[in-house]
Image (cartoon, rainbow, N blue to C red):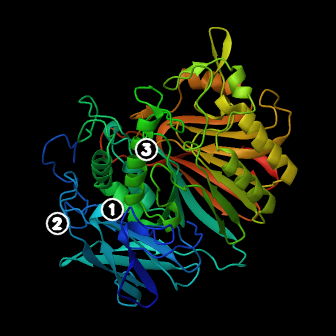
Amino acid sequence: MRKIVATSHGGTAVACGFSKVSRRDVLFGGVAASALPLLGVAGCGAPSPVPPQGSAAANGNRLFSLGVASGEPGPDSVILWTRLAPEPLHGGGMGPAPVPVRWEVAEDEAMRHVVRRGTALARPDLAHAVHVEVAGLAPRRWYWYRFDAGGEASVVGRTRTTPAPGEALDLFRFAAASCQNYQHGYFTAYRHMAAEDLDLVVHLGDYIYEGGPRASFPRRHDDVEADTLAGYRNRYALYKLDPDLQAAHAAFPWCVVYDDHEVDNDYANDREVRQRVSPAAFLRRRAAAYRAYFEHLPFRSAQMPRGANMGLYRSMEIGGLIDLNLLDTRQYRTDQPCGESGGKWHPQCAGARGPGATMLGREQEAWLYGRLGAGRARWSVLAQQVPIMERRRMIHGDHRYNMDKWDGYSAARDRLFTAVRQHRVPGLVALSGDVHSAWAGTLLTDFQDPRSAALGTEFVATSISSGGDGRDMRPRARKMLAANPGIAFYNGQRGYARFTVTREAWRTDYRVVPHVSTPGAPIRTRASFAVARGRPGPEPV
């Protein structure tokens, strides 16, 4: 079942189908080799939409209309991604035949000093996407790459490897992004992100939104709600046509984890919150969603979905400085307790405190606690989807909580905090998204007692576009700040979080744009916070 495509200079490309292959044989979209544990216009409602200006498609690059990307970097390897799609919103337009795609990696942007090259096979069973693992690279250096097929060349992308094993890294810069609803506005923040001095981008989920088109929004989804493989593929294609998103992908390697909207809003394991279908039917939808997610992002072979299951959680050590744990809080969680429905706030009930409640599932919990115990990096990072810190609201005289977040799984949070205490993790930082606003706070042993022991720091990244233009402060948020002693900061504008990490200190800059309803907004740093290693909690800079 496995076909090796001719390569040279240390790259391997492997072709495989989506079914009838062993786990050993499963490799990316018919292209990539086995991977190492690695680091890291207008609306389109018309039948024949015009590609957004600045995208690869708008610049006459039909085959590579969705741009290029890299991800999962290691000390000597990186994943390169593209997808052949001359008709991106109509199934791709490539037909049933596999297509050879040439790739090159160079030490310079002009692509004169090529150090690796080879050929991969873009197969129809994975939407003519290619994922190539390029091995034999030098640690901690920039490389440039491109693809070629059918007489067309892709844009040139840039990527970076991580430090060599045992190297003591002194500085690392990266950014976290989350929640990019195409309909709610433009991805202007990504254009600014592409101009930053970063080593990596971490995406915390809601890369797409599954819902159907809405005429009242600045841009429109191209079709009805995505719930089939074809629907999810077209939705990813629409998002990846965005020129600002393409620019950020081409500028840095990415590591990504999904949240709920890659499948369905607020889903939990095999349950959709609206309960319109049976768990078995929902798992069929989840299988289609996970497959399209894999097809459109730079993943390694270990993340190849097997039906409705995807091995997403993983970890990466970055130069003894950061132990980056990328978590999955959707696939294994128990159903939301306390009558949760569509993100509504509820008084906490016994179900949230029950020992059977889990956000990560037992196997992922054990894996994570083992990582926390064995970690030797200066900073232990939890990159995951929903806020961990308590965010209670007073409604009709009751404290109420959003049951879709860790507040709805307080027993699971207690187990996590117990592990942190047992292993004496001195540099714990949680990175979260999902809530379309920025928050900074302290992970307290007792969230209702500001004098209780501080275990770590949490930075919640705001959305790229979800929620529309937003505003700096809302009355409800002001009340939440007063009611939650662990929370130090809130902002409701759009943007991303930028991190500068050294051996003794962590700095977070919240970068925001004033609007997303029209393109071209400027960017500024709304607030900055520092964390000293061993002294959890954000301090204003």
Query: Is residue 396 or residue 32 the one in the foreground?
Result: 32
Position of residue 273 in the picture relative to residue 295 (left or right): right
Name the front one of labels 3 and 2.
Answer: 3
Numbered badge on residue 286: 3
Q: What's under tag 3, amino acid-wise?
A: Arg
Mark 3 and 1 residues: CB-CB less than 8 Å, in contact? no
Packing grade of label 2 (10 A; few <14, some 14-19, many >=20) is few
User: Mark 2 = which residue?
Assistant: 60
Question: Seen in the image, is 44 located left or right of residue 146?
Answer: left
Secondary element type, mark 3: helix
Quadrant of the image occupied by residue 154: bottom left
* Residue at 18 percent of width and 79 percent of height: 151
Labels 2 and 1: the sequence-earlier one: 2
Amino acid type of the residue that numbered disc 1 sits on in the rendered structure? Leu
State the quadrant of the N terminus: bottom left
- Residue 317 circle label: none
Please identify the quarter of the rendering in which residue 211 is found: top left
Pinpoint residue 395: horizontal percent, then vertical percent.
61, 13
Inspect this view and state whether residue 262 appears: no
Question: Dot 1 corresponds to which residue?
Answer: 126
Taking depth in this image into account, of 14 and 533 the one nearest to the observer is 14
Residue 381 location (% of width, % of height)? 68, 55
Give the distance between the C-alpha atoms of the residues marked 2 and 1, in whole angstroms. Answer: 24 Å
Q: CA distance from mark 3 to mark 2?
A: 34 Å
The percent position of residue 444, horizontal first and vertical second, equals 78, 37
Disc nearer the start of the sequence (3/1):
1
